[in-house]
Each structure stands twice: as structure tokens, then as C-alpha cells.
Image (cartoon, helix red, strand yellow):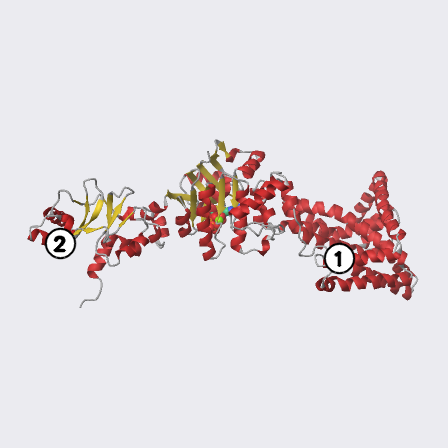
Amino acid sequence: MKLDIGKYVESGVEWLSANASGFFDAITTGIDAIVSAMQTVFLASPFWLTIIFFAVLSYYLPARGRLFTKEGWKAGGGISIFTVLGLLLLYFMGYWEETMQTIALILASALLALVMGIPLGIYAARNDRAETIIRPVLDFMQTMPAFVYLIPAIILFSVGNVPGVVATIVFALPPAVRLTNLGIRNVPADVVEASRAFGSTKRQLLFKVQLPLAMPTILAGVNQVIMLSLSMVVIASMVGASGLGQAVYKGILQADIGLGFEAGLGIVVLAIILDRITQNLGLEGVKTKE
Amino acid sequence: MGDIHVKNLNVIFGKRKKEALRLLNQGESKASILEKTGCTVGVYDANLEIKQGEIFVVMGLSGSGKSTLLRCFNRLIDPTSGSIVLDDKDIVQCNEAELREIRRKKMTMVFQHFGLLPHRTVSSNVGFGLEIQGIDYETRRKKAYETIETVGLKGYEEQMTGQLSGGMQQRVGLARALATDPEVLLMDEAFSALDPLIRNNMQDELILLQEKVNKTILFITHDLDEALKLGDRIAIMKDGKIVQIDTPENILTNPADDYVKAFVENVDRGEIITAGSIMFENPASIRIDHDGPKVALRKMRKVGVTSLPVVDNKNNFLGFVKDEEMAYMEENNLDKISEYMHSKEEVRAVNPDTPVADLLPLFLDNIYNIAVIDNDKKLIGVVVHSSVIGEMIGTNREKVVQLKEEGGLAL
Ligand SMILES: Nc1ncnc2c1ncn2[C@@H]1O[C@H](COP(=O)(O)OP(=O)(O)OP(=O)(O)O)[C@@H](O)[C@H]1O
Ligand SMILES: [Mg+2]
């Protein structure tokens, strides 16, 4: 006798696709709208404006609070120059459109992963039982080879950007939950106790104490979510997601070394820019007043 | 108003609370209950009354249940049974909303490790309690600035708390607790994390501050010197039980059991014990208006001393007379004692609340005993050398006399 788990999963997915198609259609429409909106924004703006935008962002974040000083330049100058040169390179190599599509895809996936992951992390932090259930599920989501998600994604969401985004979300969600949970749980017990002792409600405790103090950790989670989303672009292109990933995939299929290398280079450039920008989101020294 | 009555308060940690409580009532020890039920006894049958405006100190070794007891007052820990009544309301029975109201308006807390919000400025930390109450920004900022000045941090209002020293951070903690104008202040080892010098400073300032704000303060410490210095009354805890509640002086002079005795043995008694508690009350004295040298000598022999205080007919203290001079007067048939009396220029008198440490210097170059007088200058007692020395070295007077007789090298 053979225990055929695959069979069960398969019939489960088929059942979903047959009986809950309205639900999945709605999700498809929603995700598609978000991705299209982002792509439109990035593709419609002139390339120089986009470059300036990213250059300013990559300078501003690390140099906050000392914008026009030597230290500010030391912190943000290098990455800002790299951003300009990197994006110009992609533009002149003729990969601008793909690059913008990829950025839109990454941002949409990361955004959705964060919108789901952070509240889930908050919930896990405040409820020990929830944490014991969520933890193994996250481990499962992250260790299962990402390709595997593509199969049900195609069945439920057909081909194109949407199944790519869905597979990306599943893969990139865990660090958002994990690090939010960790950040909140690591808020010093006496600070939490103090807040309670002054009569704060659970909500006040969360918004005035726990989230602000957990913010650096949560932002480290944001960075990881974005980087994991980026790492999915090639895989997502196998189900029809557009962008640089598509170009790499084409390069593989056609054994076109040049194409593969150029698009791969584009992904590396994007990775460096996005990593540096999001790394500096949670920088120390950012004074939050009440 | 402001008095707190604690009755039969028990705190048990663990699952089998009922069983543990039953065993406790049968007189089982903390250790055997832990073994039998897996429950830890935090506080057992605490009964106490804290009066409005007093500093009530709870003292005990680590793990004796001090913090647990304190946290029951604002229910950061829920007691297993018993009651804590403040303003006719049993805090133990309060629901969530009532409890929040008490925490917001009536009772605040100062923490050992400050518990400040590191991402906020001093003033926004101090205004935190008011912010939680939903009070508008301008009002709470104004109140925060006032309170910051009260605790001596004027000028630091807009600094981040992380940049301040420990002592200053705890001033912020104190200001935060005072800003909501509560009736009761709970202070859990509030000064224990500070350097000794700063700690001493903060203790002095708390005493001064208390004169201004007159809160009811429950102060936890494991340091006896701190307890004696701050406490109007002190409760001593051991293994979750309160073994003695008394004034600092009574704790030192009448320890309830060997545990308390061992506790107070090494304390610097000189600052706490006062002239009033070591003096001989209603001492034998000479009435200047009708006693002569004969009477004086007889009284001295009877009491076994070499000098006696002299008073007038209203018991006002005048000076001392000595046996040699009385004997000289008797031999020469002189009878005006006032001519041979050592009057107030030569001898010293003190109030009953003068600490022993301040008495000691008065004995320098002074062979007389010291008179203890009340505010109307009436003689109420006499302090002798041996009692003072006894207090300072932590033994009794008889031992001092014995030491004197046996001590030193034979020549
Ligand atoms: N949450 C808890 N769960 C289980 N046991 C606890 C808990 N909190 C305290 N205890 C136990 O209760 C007893 C009293 O602890 P408590 O913290 O009140 O002591 P303390 O007198 O404040 O000691 P310290 O001077 O170290 O602060 C200890 O045996 C401790 O282990
Ligand atoms: Mg403690």
C-alpha cells in the first residue's frame, strides 16, 4: 500500500479550482490591478525621473539627519552614484522596460506579503498558542522548493503575473511574520510592564511601545521580504511573469548566453540598489517624537 | 483617603494553587509545597496597613516575595486570594476598566531598571501617563515640564533618555510616576541599579520630595540601610511571609525573631538609634531648691553613679554635680549646691531624637553623662557613656562595662 499524499493535495487543489473559482478570480483581479497600476506608474514616468527618484531615495535614507554634511555624503553618496550608473547602464542596454516591470512586480509582491505578514506577526507575538502553530507553517513555506508553488498557482490563477506574485508572496512572507514577532517579543519586559502599570490598553501598548521599539527588527524583515521577492523573479517568469526574469528564462530556453547574462546583470544591479535602500530604512538615529 | 488596607493576601504561582494554599494553611514550608505541588509561594497571608503620606518600606532577601507583593497593588500580578482596599475599593476585585482607571489616576510605579521608552524624549516619557489618559499634547507637555523641574532635570526636557546617566534616568522614571498626580507611588528597588553615591543622593531627594508631594509610597528594597533611612515603617519579609512590621528604631531594638536580628546585626546603628531609646528615663536628680550635698551623695551611692543632673522645682535641667565636689562640700559644711554645679556652659544636653552617632563626639573631653531634655528644657533622661559605646559597637551596656574592666593590657 502506498500513502498517496500527492493525490490528496491534487484533489484538494482541483476541488478549490472547481468550487471556489469566484474567490480566486477576485484575488486574480485584485493582484492584477495592483501590479498593473505599479507597472503603469514606472513605465509611464520618463526614465530620468525614475533614476532621479531612486538616486535621491538611496541618498536620503542613509544620510537622514545629516543630509548636506560630509558624513551624510560618506553614508549615502556611494550608493547614490551606483544607483544612477546602474540604472543608466540598464537603460542603455535596452532593458528599461523589463527593469521597470520587475520593480513593479517585486514591490507589489513585497507590499502584499508585508500587509499580510506584519499583522500576522503581531498576532503571533501576542498569543503564544498562535505562535506555536504559525512557526512550523512558516518553516514549511520557506523550505519547500519555491518551484513547487508554481503548480497550484497556475491551476488556481492561470498564467501571467498573478500566479508569479502569488508564488512570490508565499515564499517571501515568512520573514515578515517572523521578524515582526521577534521584534515585539524582544521589547524589554520592564518597558512593557511600565506601560501596563500606567494604565495603557493593549492597543496603546502596541502602537505606543511595542511597534516603535520593534521597528528596526520589522524593517529588517521588510528588507528580507524584498530580497526574497527579487530572488523569485526568474522562477515566477516560468509561469509567465514579465520583466528581467522573463529575459533570463528566455536566455536559458534559447541557450542565449548574452541575453541571459545581460538580464542577470540587471537583476544583480536591482538587488544591490533595493538592498541598500531598504537596509537603511531602520537606521539608528532616526528620532521619532510621539 | 489614601490609606491602603491589605488583608490575607496570598500569591501562589503554578497550576495547583488550591492545593498549595491548603498545604500552606496547614503550616507547610515554601520548599515542601514546591516539592509536593510544583507551586511557588510568592506571598503568604500578608496583612498590612499603609497610611496616607507615609513611606512604607518592604525589605527582605532576594526571592522573599517583595516584588510580588508590590505588583499585587496595581495587579501586574493577580493575587490568588485576599484583598487590597484603597479608598473603599478592593483592587483585587476590580475589572479591567476599573483597574486601568486606578493605574492611570491613583497608583503609579517606578522601576528598578527605569523602564523608560528609549525612542522618546525626556518630556514625552514623563508625559506618558497623561498621554495614555488621552490628555492633549499642550497640557501634558506643560505638566511634564513642571514635573521635570520638580525632580531637578530642568534643561534636559528634549534629550533622548538613552543619553542620560542612570541617576538621571531614574529621575525621569520618578517624574513620569509623579506627573499623573497619583495618590500612591510604588517603587520596586528604584535605586538599586544606581551607584552608591548617586543612590544616597536620590534617597535624600526622595525624602525632600516627599515633604513636598506627600504621597503614599510603597518602597521595596533589599538594602537595610536604605530601608532604615527612608521608611516611616518597615515590613520585613521572609519566604513570602511578613515577619515584622515596625518603625526603623523598633526593628533594630526589638527584632521579632532571629531572622530579623541577623538582618539588622550589621547595620550602622549610629544613625538610627536615638538618644531617646538608650537613655535612662526619669533619672535620679538633685533639686536645686532643697537638696544639699548630703542628699546628693546618698542618691549617687544608691544609684551607683559619680554624677547627677540638677533640676529646678519645675524639672528644668540646670547642670550636673560630681561626687568629689559634693564630698568636699560636705566636709567643709558648704550647702549652696549651685556654687559647685557644672552648669550648661560645660555640660551638654540633647533632644531625644538625636542619633547616637551625633552623641559620641559630645563625650570628647567630657566626663559627665549627657542630659536628654524635651522642647521645654525639662529633664527627661540621661545617656551614659557605656550605652553610647555599646550602641556604636553593637553590644549591650553590660558587655561594654565588662569589656572595660577586663580589656587592655595588664601593667
Ligand atoms: N511569574 C512567576 N512565576 C513563578 N514564580 C515566580 C514568578 N515571579 C516570582 N516568582 C517566585 O516568587 C518568589 C518571590 O519572588 P519576588 O520576585 O517577589 O522576590 P523579590 O523579593 O522581589 O526578590 P528580588 O530581591 O530578587 O527582586 C520567588 O521564589 C520567585 O521565584
Ligand atoms: Mg524584586
Query: Few, some or many C-alpha atoms within 10 Å of disc 2 (few <14, some 14-19, many ≥20)?
Result: some
Q: Secondary structure at mark 1?
A: helix
Which subunit holds the residue at mark 2?
B
User: What residue sits right under mark 2 in the picture?
Assistant: B325
Q: Of the residues shown, which amino acid type is indicated by label 2?
A: Glu
Q: How far across and down, in percent of the image, does residue B171 sit?
A: 52, 50
The label on residue A60 is: 1
Is residue B299 in view? yes
Indicate left or right for B396 with B81 as reference.
Answer: left
Which subunit holds the residue at mark 1?
A
The residue at 47%/55% (across/down) is B198
Say which of marks 2 and 1 sits in front. 2
**Most extreme residue toward the bottom, as rendered?**
B411
Quarter-wise, where is residue A271 in the image? bottom right
**Most extreme residue toward the top, as rendered?**
B88
Indicate left or right for A255 with B15 as reference.
Answer: right
The residue at 50%/32% (across/down) is B89
Indicate left or right for B159 with B196 as reference.
Answer: right
Give the Cα distance between marks 2 and 1: 95 Å
Dot 2 beta carbon under 8 Å from ligand 1: no
Q: Is residue A261 above or below residue A224?
A: below
Dot 1 beta carbon under 8 Å from ligand 1: no
